Image: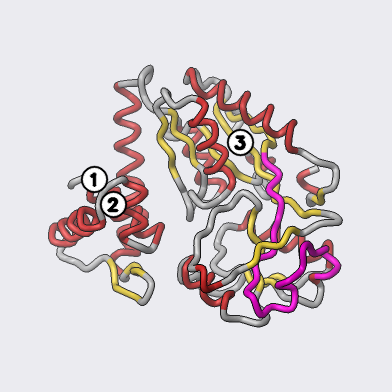
């Protein structure tokens, strides 16, 4: 089985678009389509169905996805086993749109000569990600450890390195659209919509946030891709979403979406970096030091964190 085709299939499944997958893989959209088409011919099934803003997995595609991911992990283990001293540093940033990806990119810009493999385990829960680090298929991952701090394997280490400040994302007709900043108290009467979550860690965090400030945060319902979410928020007079200060989203200028800082206090999503204590990769130590110094320089006392993160 062509691993490039399998990798392309997984990337399209995670991004929901052939063009976005092609950008991540640094190939053309036509090249991505050809790879997936060849995989479909080999398997004799259709893996994706077209929708208005991209593609969605078919039933066969959903069945294949976990096995395709495992196949790629197995290939990575094979490579690591024969080139342990020269392999790329493998970091899971969870999603290429959020703060860990931006921070890793900034580190790479300062160390552009290193070999780096950026992994995005978007739909993997914390236990699965920690298992990858423990097995050596990942050098590090970023997780909140809300529900898993006491279950971290003994060979792993963790350090809180990111306090991701929240911003309110609203459309131009939302009642708070023209605010320069908003407080948690001002959000009590404005429901927040966070659909598509399956990982218990972020779901639990937003439950904690809602209880702490009396907010209404809806994490129930399907997620049809970030593009569909942004379009609905732009067209709504009521929908609002919480995004991280370091997250990166692009939308058409006509949407006129607003990102409004949340202050007094600023809720933050706490993220820890997790790595193996005995990992000898020469670049990992530099990256951990970079994260430590960055956190010391950016941490503030004007923030709110849930009890389990303090």
What residue is at 44 percent from the left and 27 percent from the top?
112
Q: Which residues are magenta?
A: 162-186
Mark 3 and mark 1 lie on one chain; the one further toward the N terminus is 1
Q: Quadrant of the C terminus?
A: top right
Labelled disc at residue 4: 1
* Residue at the front extreme of this rendering: 253
Question: Residue 237: within the magenta?
Answer: no
Q: Residue at x 57, y 80 (%)?
A: 235
Q: Is residue 110 left or right of residue 181?
A: left
Q: Is residue 309 above or below residue 202?
A: above
Percent x, y for residue 68? 31, 51
Task: Name the residue rendered at 23%, 44% in the picture.
Answer: 3
- The quarter holding residue 38 reads bottom left
Say which of 6 and 289 sits in front. Answer: 289
Q: Earlier in the sequence, mark 2 or mark 3?
A: 2
**Hey, which quadrant is residue 234 in on the image?**
bottom right
Residue 73 locus on image (x, y percent)? 36, 40
Judge left or right: residue 77 versus residue 181: left
Q: Classify 10 Å Cα crowding around label 2: few (below 14), some (14-19), many (20 and above).
A: many
Q: CA distance from mark 1 to mark 2?
A: 6 Å
Which residue position holds label 3? Answer: 273
Marker disc for residue 8: 2
Q: What secondary structure is found at the residue carrying circle 3?
A: strand
Locate residue 193: give its quadrant.
bottom right
Residue 67 in percent (x, y) is at 32, 52
Residue 70 pos. (x, y %): 35, 46
Is 174 magenta? The answer is yes
């Amino acid at each position: 089985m062509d691993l490039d085709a399998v990798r392309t299939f997984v990337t399209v499944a995670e991004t929901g678009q052939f063009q976005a997958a092609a950008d991540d893989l640094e190939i053309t959209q036509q090249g991505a389509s050809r790879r997936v088409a060849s995989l479909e011919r080999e398997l004799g099934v259709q893996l994706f169905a077209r929708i208005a803003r991209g593609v969605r997995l078919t039933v066969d595609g959903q069945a294949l996805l976990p096995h395709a991911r495992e196949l790629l992990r197995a290939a990575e283990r094979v490579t690591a086993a024969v080139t342990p001293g020269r392999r790329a540093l493998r970091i899971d940033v969870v999603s290429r749109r959020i703060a860990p990806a931006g921070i890793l990119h900034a580190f790479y810009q300062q160390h552009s000569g290193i070999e780096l493999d950026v992994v995005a385990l978007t739909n993997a829960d914390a236990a699965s990600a920690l298992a990858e680090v423990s097995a050596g298929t990942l050098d590090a991952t970023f997780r909140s450890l809300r529900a898993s701090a006491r279950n971290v394997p003994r060979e792993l280490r963790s350090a809180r390195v990111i306090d991701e400040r929240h911003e309110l994302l609203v459309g131009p007709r939302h009642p708070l659209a023209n605010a320069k900043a908003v407080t948690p108290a001002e959000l009590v009467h404005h429901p927040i919509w966070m659909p598509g979550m399956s990982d218990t860690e972020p779901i639990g965090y937003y439950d904690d946030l809602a209880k702490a400030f009396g907010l209404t945060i809806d994490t129930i319902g399907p997620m049809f891709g970030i593009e569909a979410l942004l379009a609905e928020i732009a067209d709504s007079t009521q929908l609002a979403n919480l995004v991280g200060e370091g997250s990166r989203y692009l939308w058409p200028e006509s949407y006129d979406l607003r990102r409004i800082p949340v202050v007094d206090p600023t809720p933050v999503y706490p993220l820890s970096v997790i790595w193996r204590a005995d990992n000898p990769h020469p670049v990992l130590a530099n990256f951990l030091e970079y994260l430590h110094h960055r956190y010391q320089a950016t941490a503030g006392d004007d923030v709110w964190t849930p009890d389990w993160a303090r």
